[in-house]
Amino acid sequence: MQNSSDVPMTSTRPYLIRAIHEWIVDNALTPYILINAQADGASVPGGYTKDGKIVFNISSNATKNLYLGNEEVTFTGRFNGMSIPVSIPTDAVLAVYAKETGAGMAFQDESREEEQTELPKEAQGLEEEGSTKEKSDKEEPEEGNKAFSQKPPTSDKPSRPTLRIVK
């Protein structure tokens, strides 16, 4: 019988990308992906990147022929009225999240392991699981989406309650 550590396993990233994408779509939200546009093999439209990253709306209304494969993510998108094919290695996907809520999952930037991945403003305020920040043993991730948990308060004072209007 083989030792389980000797068995080569594929990356979990493409499976998680597909699962989070499906979860976002099932909840009638808009799936976005954050990409490292400078990654080897990334074919993205020029002029749309910021700090070497680009965000794509990968909803069925915004893309054509979306393929979330084990090795790459491909689709055709419209940029300035022109259909442009986009091809991204799955290792270049830094996050997949819902535009409306920021709920989703961030991944380690394997090309820059030492740098922290910056999420778009919609996803800020959420902390990546397995981040280098120390977590208390008592702190547990939210049920349902264990990839993100709310940032702990920075002071010992309890935070003020807030209300949100839901229409």
Image (tube, helix red, strand yellow):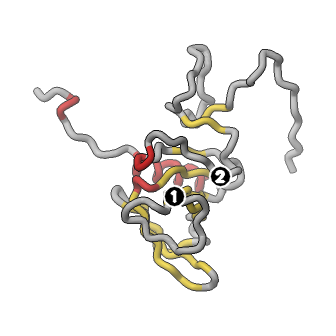
Location of the N terminus (image quadrant):
top left
Looking at the image, do the residues carrying marks 2 and 1 touch, with CB atoms under 8 Å apart? no
Side of 57 where 73 appears, left or right: left
The label on residue 120 is 2
Which amino acid, mark 2?
Pro
Q: Residue at x 49, y 62 (%)?
A: 37
Residue 147 occupies which quadrant of the picture? top right
Residue 162 occupies which quadrant of the picture? top right
Locate residue 40, reporting x and y percent.
38, 61
Locate residue 146, reporting x and y percent.
55, 33
Which amino acid, mark 1?
Ile
Locate residue 41, reporting x and y percent.
37, 65
Characterize the local packing of mark 1: few (<14), some (14-19) or many (20 or more) Cα atoms within 10 angstroms.
many
Relative height, residue 19 to residue 43 (above, below): above
Characterize the local packing of mark 2: few (<14), some (14-19) or many (20 or more) Cα atoms within 10 angstroms.
some
Relative height, residue 117 to residue 3 (above, below): below
Mark 2–mark 1 distance (CA, rounded to whole Å): 11 Å
The label on residue 35 is 1
Q: Residue at x 61, y 48 (%)?
A: 119
SS state under label 2 = loop
Side of 167 where 114 appears, left or right: left
